[in-house]
Amino acid sequence: MSTILQKAREYEQKYRVYITPEERPGYHLTPQVGWMNDPNGFSFYGGEYHLFYQYHPYSTEWGPMHWGHAVSTDLLRWKYLPAAIAPDTEIDQVGCFSGSAIELPDGRQLLMYTGVRQGRNEDGTRRDQQTQCLAVGNGLNYVKYTANPVLDDKDLPEGFTTADFRDPKLWREEDGSYACVVGARTEDGSGAILLFTSPDGFQWKYENILDRSYNEYGRMWECPDFFPLDGKQLLITSPQDMSPLGLEFHNGNNTMALIGSYDRNTHRFEREQVQAIDYGLEFYAPQTMLTPDGRRVMIGWLQNWDTCSAQPPNAKWFGQTSTPRELSLKDGRLIQVPVREIEALHGRRVAYQDVTVQEEVSLKGVYGRMVDMTVTLRPADVDGFQQFTIKVAKGSQHYTNITFFPKASVLRVNRAHSGLARDIIHERDCLVRQQNGEIRLRILLDRFSLEIFVNGGEQAMSTAIYTPQTADGISFEADRSVIMSVEKFDIIAE
Ligand code: FRU
C-alpha cells in the first residue's frame, strides 16, 4: 500500500470517532471524515452494495481526491470500509476523480476512474490532464493497473482533449463485453458524452459521440450514465454552467436525463426527450446501478457546488448522498421513488384522514427529523385555496417551508430559516401536476436533508438543511380550507 493511502486510512481511523452517530444523518451516507462529493462505483459485489465517493479526508473542503468506501445490505445503512484508492501515482497525482465499479468474471472488482495529472499548455500555464484508469481489488484493497491510463489523448476523436475528459461509467453487456461512457468537451466548449467498448474491461476502444450539448444544455457534461429503462434508453449527465430554462435547471450545475432510443449495433443514441432530474437546491452527479432483483437505482450527491460555502459552523463532515431512488418511466417521463428498503426502517405510524386545515396546526404525533411522510391535499370548496404550507424541522427560530400554489401549480421549497447564516439562494420552485385538484407529496426528512417526491415520483426536490435537531416540529396551514390526509412513519435507522 502506498504511504499516501496508508496515511488516509490511519487518519480516518483516528478521527472518525470524533463524529458521533447523532451528528450524522440516519440513512444518508456522509464521508467517514472530512469532505465528500460525487458518489462513485455504486454497485453490488460480494453480496453487498458498495458505494465509493469522492473524498478528501483531511478537511471539509475539496482537495486531492481519494475514493472513500462504504458497504450496505439495504442501501440505507452504510458501514465504512477504509479509503479505497488515493492520488499516489504519477498519472493520478492531482486526484482520483469520479468513476464506477463492476465485478469481473473471475470474481475481482474492477474500478474505473479518472486519473488527473499535472500538465502544461504550450505557453507554460497549467493544464491538468484527465485520463481513464483502472484498479482491481477484492472489495477492500485495490491495486492500480500497471498499464494505466487505459484511455488517453490518443483515444480521443478530433477536437477533444484531456483537459476535460472524465467520469467513466462502465457496464457489462449481455455478450460479456464491456462498454463505458465518459464526459468530455468539444471544440465549441460544450459537453459531449463519448462511448468506448472493450472485450475484457482492460483494452478500450473509442466508438462514437452518443450526444452533445452544442451549448444548449450547459457546458461540460460531467458524470454520465447510460442504461435501458422500460423500453427506452436513458443518458443521464450533470452539465456544468447551465442557464435556467423556465423553472428548470436553476442550480448552475444541474442534472438531466436524456430519454431516447439506442441501437447497440451502430452505437447510435437518438435523443427524444430532455428532463431535469431534481428541482431542489442540492442534487448533483447521480449514478445508477442494477440491483440483483433487477431494479435500476440512482443515488446522487445531495449538494450543489455553488452552495458548498454554506457549511454549518465547526462542520466535522461535509457532503452527503441522496436517498437511493428506484427509477422507472411513465408516459415517457422519468419517475423516481425512494428505494422500497426504506419501508423496513419504518417505525411508529401516525395517520390522519381528510382533516380540514386552514389556521396553522400541528397534528398530534406528526413531528420528527427522521421521517417518511405522505401528505395528500385537495381544496375543501370550489373557490379553492391559493397557498398551502408545510413547515418541517420547525423550532422556535427555525423552519423550512414547503409551499404549494395550486393556481400556478407550483411547489416551492424554502430553507431561508433553516439555520444557515449565509446569504445564498434558499428557494426553488417546481412545476407540478394536479390530478383532479389533488396533489400528493412524499417527504423524506433525515437529520440534515429534505427530499420531496411529488405524485409518486413525477418530480423530486432535494435540499440540505442544517437545522438544530431540537427543531423537530411539523405544521400545516392554508389561506382557505384544505382537505388533507397525512401518513407519517418515523424512520428507525440505527
Ligand atoms: C463532479 C466532478 C466530476 C469530477 C469530480 C472531482 O462533481 O467535478 O466531474 O470527477 O467532481 O471531484
Image: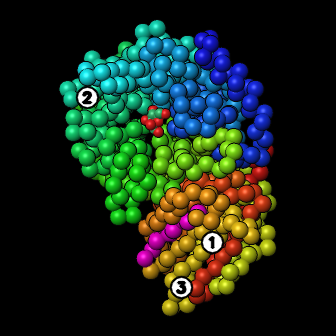
The residue carrying pointer 1 sits among few (fewer than 14), some (14 to 19) or many (20 or more) residues within 10 Å by Cα, namely many
Total residue callouts: 3
Quarter of the figure that contains the C terminus: top right
Q: Check disc 2 and give the amino acid type.
A: Phe
Q: Is residue 489 left or right of residue 204?
A: right
Q: What range of the chain is rendered magenta?
A: 408-415
Residue bearing mark 1? 390
| Mark identifier at residue 385 | 3
Q: Is residue 259 left or right of residue 483?
A: left
Question: In percent of the image, x 71 and y 33: which residue is there?
Answer: 79
**Farthest residue in the front direction?**
124
Q: Check disc 1 and give the amino acid type.
A: Ile
**Is residue 412 in the magenta section?**
yes
Mark 1, secondary structure of its residue: strand
Residue bearing mark 2? 160
Relative to 31, does residue 125 appear above or below in the rendering?
Answer: above
